[in-house]
Image (cartoon, rainbow, N blue to C red):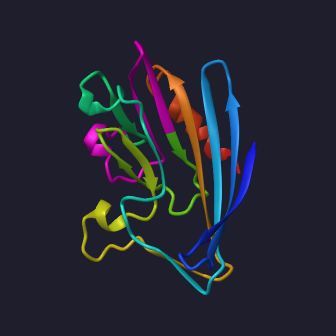
Amino acid sequence: VIRTRNAWKAPNGDVLCEDDRTMVFGADAATRWIDFRITVKAIQDRVVFGDTKEGSFGVRVASSLPVDEKAGGKIVNSDGLTNGQAWGKQAAWVDYAGPVDGQRVGIAILNHPQSLRYPTYWHVREYGLFAANPFGVHDFLGKADADGSLELKAGESFSLYYRVILHGDDYQAAQIADAFDRYARES
């Protein structure tokens, strides 16, 4: 377990927000996982998280995994949408799998139902970008009046909960849907 408390500072040094992050690491015979619990609390009277597709919780996958490499990489979400169809969609989880050093492996990110704006939107691209983002509503929906901004007053907070699973083979063999069901029952 790693736990940190972080101050989000403005260029002038004023603390705008604080966050409390906990990472819990686990493993079994087939997978490794990391649970991320992040709570962000406003310190200033008004803190705004803007609508952008570029933010939030993400990873870059290994250079051999991207679908664009045409080496067998595949993106799939909890609704069965694959590759480019998964971009900008809300889903409970997304898996990105493909070959690394001659073995098929994958990384799945699960979004817990208690997380802000569950199920989150996914900024997942065929070139290897893989991010969960509850804020990028305007770009994801493609509507001029859509706004994913979030304003907090002093003392207000939001929480994000994700489980990252590193697994062998593909999402079906790794039983990612079952793993999500178990994770969703945890509080």
Residue 93 screen position, x and y as percent? 47, 43
Task: Reply yes or no: does residue 127 show up in magenta.
Answer: no
- Magenta segment range? 80-108
Front residue (pair 166, 184): 166
Seen at 66% across and 79% down, the residue is 43
Residue 142 screen position, x and y as percent? 25, 65
Task: Reply yes or no: does residue 84 show up in magenta.
Answer: yes
Seen at 25% across and 70% down, the residue is 143
Image quadrant where residue 103 sits: top left
Q: Is residue 15 above or below residue 142?
A: below
Seen at 36% across and 28% down, the residue is 65
Image quadrant where residue 147 sits: bottom left
Q: Is residue 125 above or below residue 89?
A: above
In-image side of 184 versus 148 (left or right):
right
Name the quadrant of the N terminus. top right
Q: Is residue 146 above or below residue 22?
A: below
In-image side of 125 versus 95 (left or right):
left
Q: Which residue is outermost to the bottom?
A: 45
Residue 163 screen position, x and y as percent? 59, 42
Residue 61 screen position, x and y as percent? 42, 35
Front residue (pair 160, 99): 99
